[in-house]
């Protein structure tokens, strides 16, 4: 579901950039949980929150509502790892971000198929 998400700054997918890898995705159908670790391309990546938000939105739109999602940065790979993870884990912050029309447009561009 997430391998084809486009990077917001590069003409490549998150999978092509090794931002997302299958080994860092854990699905527990019995407990209705999905955990995704993503690795920003550089430790100071300014788009880390946007990338995490794009992954989260794709999963929210694709999976049944019963799933609890945990999207976070691979430990030790980003200077603002704690702050980004806190934002992504906060339902109110995620909802508020998606009410921002410009931000939602950027997320939708990341999720749209390249032609």
Image (cartoon, rainbow, N blue to C red):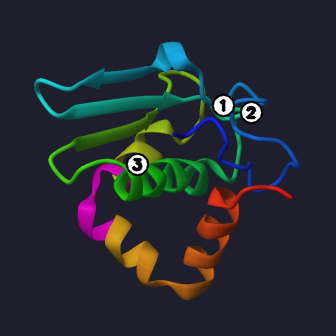
Is the residue 26 above or below the residue 47 in the image? above
For the point 16% across and 34% down, the residue is 32
Callout 3: SS: helix
Q: Is residue 91 magenta?
A: yes
- The residue identified by callout 3 is 59
Q: Position of residue 64 (x, y in %)?
A: 24, 50
According to the picture, the residue beneath numbered tag 2 turns out to be 41
- Give the labeled residue for mark 1: 19
Q: CA distance from mark 3 to mark 1?
A: 16 Å
- Identify the mark nearer the N-term, 1 or 2: 1
Q: Residues within 10 Å of mark 3 (few under 14, many from 20)?
A: many
How far apart marks 1 and 2 lie (CA) works out to: 6 Å
The x, y position of residue 72, in whole percent, is: 42, 36
Who's the residue at 53% across and 21% down the image?
76
| Place of residue 92 in the rendered image (x, y in percent of width and height, measured from the top left) | 26, 69
- In space, the residues marked 3 and 2 are separated at their CA atoms by 21 Å
- State the image coordinates of residue 51 (x, y, percent, origin top left): 60, 50
Asked if the residue at tag 1 contacts the one at tag 3, i.e. Cβ–Cβ closer than 8 Å, the answer is: no
Looking at the rendered image, the disc whose residue lies closer to the viewer, 3 or 1, is: 3
Viewer-side residue, 92 vs 62: 62
Contact flag, marks 1 and 2 (Cβ < 8 Å): yes
Q: Main secondary structure of the magenta part?
A: helix
Depth check, mark 1 against mark 2: the one in front is 1
For the C terminus, the quadrant is bottom right
Magenta region includes residue 57: no
Bounds of the magenta segment = 87-93
Which image quadrant for residue 40? top right
Of the pair 39 and 107, the residue shown nearer to us = 107
Relative to residue 82, is residue 112 drawn left or right? right
For mark 2, does the 10 Å Cα neighbourhood hold few (<14), some (14 to 19), or many (20 or more) residues? Answer: some
């Amino acid at each position: 579901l997430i391998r084809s998400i486009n990077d917001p700054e590069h003409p490549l997918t998150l999978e092509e950039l090794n931002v997302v890898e299958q080994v860092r995705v854990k699905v527990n159908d019995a407990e209705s949980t999905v955990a995704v670790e993503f690795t920003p391309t550089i430790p100071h990546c300014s788009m880390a929150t946007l990338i995490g938000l794009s992954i989260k939105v794709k999963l929210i739109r694709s999976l049944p509502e019963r799933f609890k999602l945990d999207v976070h940065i691979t430990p030790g790979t980003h200077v603002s790892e704690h702050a980004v993870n806190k934002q992504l884990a906060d339902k109110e912050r995620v909802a508020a971000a998606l009410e921002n029309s410009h931000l939602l447009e950027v997320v939708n561009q990341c999720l749209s198929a390249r032609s």
